[in-house]
Amino acid sequence: MHEMTLAVSVLQIVEDAAQREGLRRVRAVWLEIGQLSSVEPEAMRFCFDAAARDSVAAGARMEIVTTAGADWCSECAETVALGELGAA
């Protein structure tokens, strides 16, 4: 489950930011996850909750925003929407 590795990395970023800003508690974490990233949002929430125990983010709500996939079209020199890998 690669979500646990990602969750631990996100927690480190949150803890670093909290320390830098002098915060004792984080109540919410907003995270963008790309539609084509192969990251399951519910698994990410579960892993973050587990990783955040006994940390500044213990009990924090994780808000996940899913972003659309995109690719660069070399023919038209524009970014185009991509619904699945290899679909461009």
Image: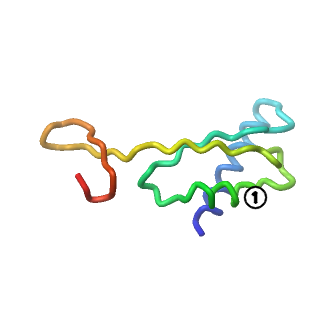
How many neighbours does mark 1 have within 10 angstroms: few (below 14), some (14-19), or many (20 or more)? many
- Chosen colour scheme: rainbow
Question: Residue reaching furthest top?
Answer: 21
Helix, strand or loop at label 1? It is helix
What kind of residue is marked 1? Ala
Residue drawn at x 66%, y 56% is 7
Q: Nearer the viewer, residue 84 or 16?
A: 84
Quadrant for the N terminus in the image: bottom right
Q: Is residue 84 left or right of residue 61?
A: left
Percent from the top left, x then y, of residue 65?
Answer: 55, 42
The residue that label 1 is drawn on is 51
Residue drawn at x 30%, y 43% is 81
Percent from the top left, x then y, of residue 11?
Answer: 71, 50
Question: Residue reaching furthest left?
Answer: 75
- The total number of labels drawn is 1
Q: Image quadrant of residue 76?
A: top left
Percent from the top left, x then y, of residue 42?
Answer: 62, 57
Percent from the top left, x then y, of residue 88?
Answer: 23, 52
Residue drawn at x 71%, y 43% is 14
Q: Is residue 72 left or right of residue 17?
A: left
